[in-house]
Image (tube, grey):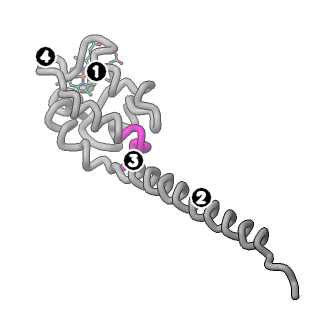
Amino acid sequence: MKSFPLDRILAAAVLVSAAAAFTAAQTTTQTRAMHLSHVPYSTVAPLIKAQCAGCHNDKRHPENVDLSSYAALIKSNVAVAGHPEKSRLIAYVDGTKKPRMPMGKMPLTAAQITLLKKWISAGAKP
Ligand code: HEC
């Protein structure tokens, strides 16, 4: 009678648990990526419209910044997709650059700035 192949069973068990751990890690990564990629312009549009578009629109657009629509915002070159830290849209609302926007109004709240950053981090998508 052959000896019991315990080593094989152990090897198989190790493989199975490694595969399970890998799958779990992969699922977490995918969930995170999916979460980030789902930040559409509609999540920031009301904020930008209320706080910025009164001054930055197709009639007046200081520094060539028109924030009255998604297309105009992108054309104005204020959001570097994936890089809030390189985006003028952020630098001028968080006070890194002056004059702080929205000019002459209350500064945006931390939550509002976080929302803008999230949108840009997720690719500044329509
Ligand atoms: C009351 C009018 C007003 C409002 C509201 C306003 N801005 Fe501005 N914005 C200006 C003016 C004027 C300038 C030019 C300032 C300067 O360079 O002296 C400017 C410049 C800018 C610039 C370009 C700065 C540069 O030189 O590169 C950005 C980016 C900007 N605004 C973003 C925003 C954002 C984002 C909001 C909304 C959160 C906003 N602004 C709200 C008047 C406004």
Name the residue beneath numbered marker 4. 104
User: What is the residue that sits farthest to the bottom in this orientation?
Assistant: 1
The N terminus, quarter of image: bottom right
Q: In which quarter of the image is residue 64?
A: top left
Q: Mark 3 and mark 4 in contact (Cβ < 8 Å)? A: no
Judge: label 2 CB < 8 Å from ligand 1. Answer: no
- For image coordinates 40% across by 48% down, the residue present is 36
Judge: label 3 CB < 8 Å from ligand 1. Answer: no
Q: Mark 3 and mark 2 in contact (Cβ < 8 Å)? A: no
Gap in angstroms between the C-alphas marked 4 and 3 = 29 Å
Residue 26, horizontal then vertical, whole percent = 55, 57
Q: Mark 3 and mark 1 in contact (Cβ < 8 Å)? A: no
Q: Nearer the viewer, mark 2 or mark 3?
A: 2
Q: Which mark is residue 94?
A: 1
Name the residue beneath numbered marker 3. 125
Q: Which of marks 1 and 3 is in front?
A: 1
- Magenta-drawn segment: 119-126
Query: Residue 79 versus residue 57: which sits nearer the camera?
Result: 79
Query: Residue 2 versus residue 42: which sits nearer the camera?
Result: 2
Mark closest to the chain's N terminus, 1 or 2: 2
Gap in angstroms between the C-alphas marked 1 and 2 = 39 Å
Q: Does the magenta stretch include residue 121?
A: yes
